[in-house]
Amino acid sequence: MRTLLRTTTAAVVAAALLTTGAVTASATDRLTGLADGLVAAGAPGVIVRVDNGRRVTELARQARWTVQDHRLRPTDQFRMASNTKTVTATIALQLVAEGTLALADPVEKWLPGAVPNGGAITVEMLLKQTSGLFDYLDDPRLVPLIIGREQHDWQPAELVAVAVEHPPLFAPGERWDYSNTNYTLAGMVLEKASGRTYADLVGQRVIRPLRLTDTRVPTDATFPGRHAHGYEPDAEHLAPHLPPGTPPGTGFAGPEHDDHVDVTGIDISPAWAAGGMTSTARDWQRFQSALFSGRLLPREQLRTMLATVPQDQGADRYGLGVMEISTPCGTVWGHTGGLPGYSSYNFADRTGARTVSVLTTRMELFAPENTAAEKALFEAAVCRMYS
């Protein structure tokens, strides 16, 4: 045993470097293999970006039939969908820290008459998804918007009005249920409390301070630079995934080829404060690093954001615009997102020093056969993040 301890320092360092290199190569190969497997399972394309605090791993894989539309790159802009909720909650907590807003404020204080029982629903309930309000995306009137067959420019107040035509799911604060109505209302509260538009707030408080050059709150379907194309199945292949009673032939708007529709041109900007932002994996990881390291929020507000409650099913938990997810390699904090053509997982460790993004150019809702492969890739990326 004593003889074994006489290894020279140089040999120890060399052995450590060789081992680290082997582990890094193995982990990267595994990520690449799982990304290829996800594409083989039917995903049109996938972007992976992992920052373990010492090294950044980026890769992009796509199905051959998508190359005619766009060559996918890890730096492409992407619809981040419900990841936007983390930004909305961050701005709300900044206003709380400044004394402009209070989490205990009832919605009625800022938006009189906007929702029934608004005096019993607080800002915190909106951000934590415990208000009980119906999700307007579950109303059939929103289907034409989602599939791109309607040109109506839905305003936030109109979407809330659709939601409150339905009875609440439960009394305010009684339990948890995910609803985009909560975050549309939160965006309206932020505008009323600050006197600025939501896009101005995001630009002033997040985009410009962090120099997020590829991040924005769009007002239409266009991207200002290189962007990932999103796809969904054509009407024939989509039919098995639609609810019973859906009219025959219902399908997404957009150019069709190879049994798919290019849905990049669908305008989802009405998702707004609940899911309208576009960004890149690199920009979003910069945002998450700043958030969880305490650069965007004082300690008290960050602690409040990360005080999670159980979601309806499974072990996952929800704070204020932040999901807490347990994986085989450790717990991560962040959010998921899904819009036609775009599915995203953006997470970080508790300190923000390590981040992971898995972005798929097809919505998981319409591709349940991809769920297992997408989850395996995400978990492998988290393990790579935690090394």
Image (cartoon, rainbow, N blue to C red):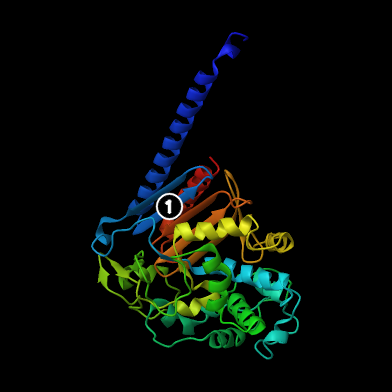
Please name whichever residue, 146 or 50, is drawn nearer the observer in this view of the structure. Answer: 50
Mark 1 Cα-neighbour bin, 10 Å: few <14, some 14–19, many ≥20: many
Please name whichever residue, 227 or 137, is drawn nearer the observer in this view of the structure. Answer: 227
Res. 43 in view: no
Q: Is residue 380 placed above or below 14 in the rendered structure?
A: below
Q: Residue at x 71, y 64 (%)?
A: 301
Please state the horizontal and vertical placement of residue 276, each as a whole percent of the image: 49, 73
Q: Amino acid at mark 1?
A: Val
Q: Residue at x 55, y 49 (%)?
A: 354
Q: Quadrant of residue 53?
A: top right
Please state the horizontal and vertical placement of residue 161, each as a whole percent of the image: 58, 88
Where does the N terminus fall, quadrant-wise? top right
User: Under tag 1, what secondary structure?
Assistant: strand
Please state the horizontal and vertical placement of residue 168, each as a whole percent of the image: 66, 80
Q: How many marks?
A: 1
Query: Is residue 181 left or right of 66 when viewed as pictured?
Result: right
Res. 3 in view: yes
Q: Residue at x 63, y 51 (%)?
A: 351
Query: Is residue 324 left or right of 344 when viewed as pictured?
Result: right
Please name whichever residue, 133 or 263, is drawn nearer the observer in this view of the structure. Answer: 263
Q: Residue at x 72, y 63 (%)?
A: 304
Q: Which residue is mark 1?
A: 48
Extreme bottom residue here?
A: 113
Please state the horizontal and vertical placement of residue 11, each as a whole percent of the image: 50, 19
Q: Is residue 253 placed above or below 364 in the rendered structure?
A: below
Q: Quadrant of residue 31?
A: top left
